[in-house]
Amino acid sequence: MSRIPVYEPCLDGNVSAYVNECLTSGWISSRGQFISRFEEAFASYVGADAATSVANGTVAIHLALEALGISSGDEVIVPSFTYIASVNTIIQTGATPVYVDSLSSTLQVDPAAIIAAITPRTKAVMAVHLYGHPCDMDAIVEICREHNLLLIEDCAEGFGSLWKGRHVGTFGDAATFSFFGNKTITTGEGGMVLARDPAVMERCRRLKSQGVSPSREYWHDMLAFNYRMTNIQAAIGLAQIEMADHLLNEKKRVADTYARLLEGLPLRLHKAVGDVRHSYWMCSIIVDDCQDRDALRAYLAEHGVETRPFFHMAHHMPHCHTNQVLPVGEELSKKGINLPSYPKLTTQQLEHICATIHAYFDCAAV
Ligand SMILES: *Cc1c(COP(=O)(O)O)cnc(C)c1O
């Protein structure tokens, strides 16, 4: 059996046809019909009024924070157990990230830890829907309302994730998505920003495009960026949105197969908890004994199965280091493995992966 990667994008459907339309028409830069078509299709898919496309998921977060006015002197509460982009973008605005712990059951930020971290300088909370499971949005929305805090949702890993039937990204003041090659829908590199307040949305549109005046040519009246997406990326994105339900169904099939084939081992799966839809960006296992994590990964690699370790805690990175102890996230970070999670995984491949995991624990038991 050939090597099984952790991820592989599905570029079926209209991807090639739409990209070719860009090439034959010459609209390859950040103007062209696919930009607005993708933005409108995306907004409608997630149930938002509007969406604005950007170059990647990292600048999406930076743009959202800038548009909401987050700046130096502000504190932004963020789980330390996340991808580094959630934290770097906070630092890039001049604000200070305040790290909090996560919940063992869902892997998501702990609402009680958010409350405990609030100070007079707290300006915002960043909820990250990690690995495709939604955060507890009832609790987080309530905390933000009660303490008058802005809420930003990093939905880079949450496309297709629902909290009580509602798509993530529609709860906060702003929300961001990533379309990197291994994300649930992809444009190669790409991202999207949503904002509840139309004025914030307008600021996002201006800030991402050099702050050009809507009424006067080549007049720039604010410090701004070039964070635009290209028409080619948007062409891929539109074709991906058309396939989104199919991709999510296939990923659910993969997750259900793992759940069935990995029963009875000294590990747990990252299952949906409560009235949510887990979109299974990554299908993850958490081994009981942290000694098994790297050994199992090495064993899988020897048998042609690529995996990823869970993220390191952000507050352990040199440039954002604190001396905090965040025990739940720190333990998860040492015990978690992301298994191959892409829509086209076959039953045969899934059986091989699971048989290899069983074989590892059978050997370890001897
Ligand atoms: C992928 C990801 C990002 C960044 O997206 P890019 O498109 O790679 O810049 C941000 N936050 C989280 C949680 C991610 O997984």
Image: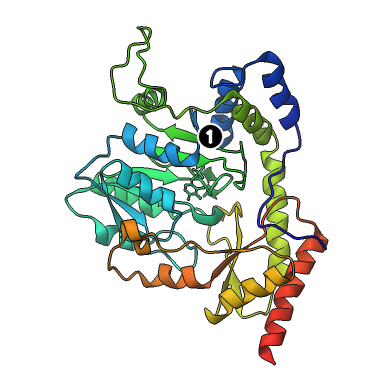
Quadrant (top left, top right, bottom left, bottom right) of the N terminus:
bottom right
Quadrant (top left, top right, bottom left, bottom right) of the C terminus:
bottom right
Query: Residue 355 location, x and y as percent?
Result: 76, 73
Please tell me whether mark 1 sits on a helix, a strand or a loop: loop
Task: Tell me if residue 306 comes above or below residue 47 in the rendering.
Answer: below
Q: Residue at x 43, y 37 (%)?
A: 59
Q: Quadrant of residue 62?
A: top left
Q: Quadrant of residue 2?
A: bottom right
Q: Residues within 10 Å of mark 1 (few under 14, many from 20)?
A: some
Query: Residue 201 location, x and y as percent?
Result: 39, 27
Horizontally, is 130 left or right of 247 in the view?
left
Query: Residue 182 location, x and y as percent?
Result: 61, 48
Q: Residue at x 32, y 62 (%)?
A: 113
Q: Residue at x 53, y 60 (%)?
A: 274
Q: Residue furthest bottom?
A: 366
Q: Residue furthest top?
A: 216
Instruction: Give the residue number, with chain letter if any, for mark 1.
Output: 47
Horizontally, is 296 left or right of 10 in the view?
left
Task: Tell me if residue 287 comes above or below residue 129 in the rendering.
Answer: below
Mark count:
1
Q: Residue at x 66, y 56 (%)?
A: 341
Give the amino acid type for the residue marked by disc 1 in the picture. Answer: Gly
Query: Residue 333 location, x and y as percent?
Result: 47, 68
Task: Tell me if residue 139 comes above or below residue 41 in the rendering.
Answer: below
